[in-house]
Amino acid sequence: AQSVTQLGSHVSVSEGALVLLRCNYSSSVPPYLFWYVQYPNQGLQLLLKYTSAATLVKGINGFEAEFKKSETSFHLTKPSAHMSDAAEYFCAVSDQGGSEKLVFGKGTKLTVNP
Amino acid sequence: DSGVTQTPKHLITATGQRVTLRCSPRSGDLSVYWYQQSLDQGLQFLIQYYNGEERAKGNILERFSAQQFPDLHSELNLSSLELGDSALYFCASSEYPSSGGANEQFFGPGTRLTVL
């Protein structure tokens, strides 16, 4: 079964600082990996996805993530945090068993300090 | 706006009751997924429908059921409600199943269920 671990349930950065949100996955086959963002009182919005085309994936709002098979990681980064980035971020892996259900990590709440 | 609509936005009910949550997928999307988000369990997949047929089941309780209608909207029915069923219920939709599961799922704003 697929699983996702997000290290750090809360991350706090200063405005303009690097954002690094960690995600490790467990999968017996090459996975498809996703990062979603959830703003308060809203649904989830896709930031980016990895589908094996390229290991460095660029997404919306200046975010990117790098797939590292040897480390089973898919960490999310952004060079310079904005106040508007404050939200909860979820890493997810899709089930390779034929279904497209998403298996989510527990989420990381990002706080951006002025 | 993802194009996925969910009603109602909020629902407050009592233990033992039954409720129905409704979801309309994006225009053209044939797959609908239901997820439950709670503080202790996080985001959990419940069930998936594709073009009216059940496609996959997750950790969905027997007290819960769902269906997808010919117009592709879906309903999630929760019965004999317990306090622990209080959660945010999301519906998501995608274009179609793909061989690798790489289709983006578009999420609705959710229905917040409170069981008192």
Image (cartoon, helix red, strand yellow):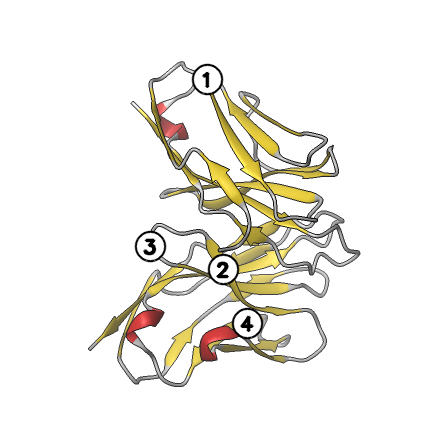
Q: Which element carries disc 3, helix, strand or loop?
A: loop
The amino acid sitting under disc 3 is: Pro
The amino acid sitting under disc 2 is: Gln
Q: Which element carries disc 1, helix, strand or loop?
A: loop
Q: Which element carries disc 2, helix, strand or loop?
A: strand
Taking the spot 30% from the left edge, 85% from the top edge, the residue there is: A16
Mark 4 or mark 2, which is nearer the start of the sequence? 2
Q: The disc numbered 3 marks a residue on which chain? A: A
Identify whether A48 is placed above or below B62.
below
Write down the quadrant of residue A21 in the picture: bottom left
Are labels 3 and 4 on one chain?
Answer: yes
Q: Tag 4: Cα neighbours inside 10 Å, few (<14), some, or many (≥20)?
A: many
> Label 1 to label 3, Cα distance in Å?
27 Å
Mark 2 or mark 3, which is nearer the start of the sequence? 3
Nearest-to-viewer mark from 2 and 4: 2
Q: Tag 1: Cα neighbours inside 10 Å, few (<14), some, or many (≥20)?
A: some
Q: Which mark is residue B18?
A: 1
The amino acid sitting under disc 4 is: Phe
Q: Which mark is residue A45?
A: 2
Q: Which residue is mark 3?
A: A40
Of B80 and A105, nearer the camera is: B80
Residue lying farthest to the left in this orientation: A114
3 and 4 marks in contact (CB < 8 Å):
no
Are labels 1 and 3 on one chain?
Answer: no
Identify whether B17 is placed above or below A1.
above
Q: Which mark is residue A74?
A: 4
Q: Is residue A61 left or right of residue B114?
A: right
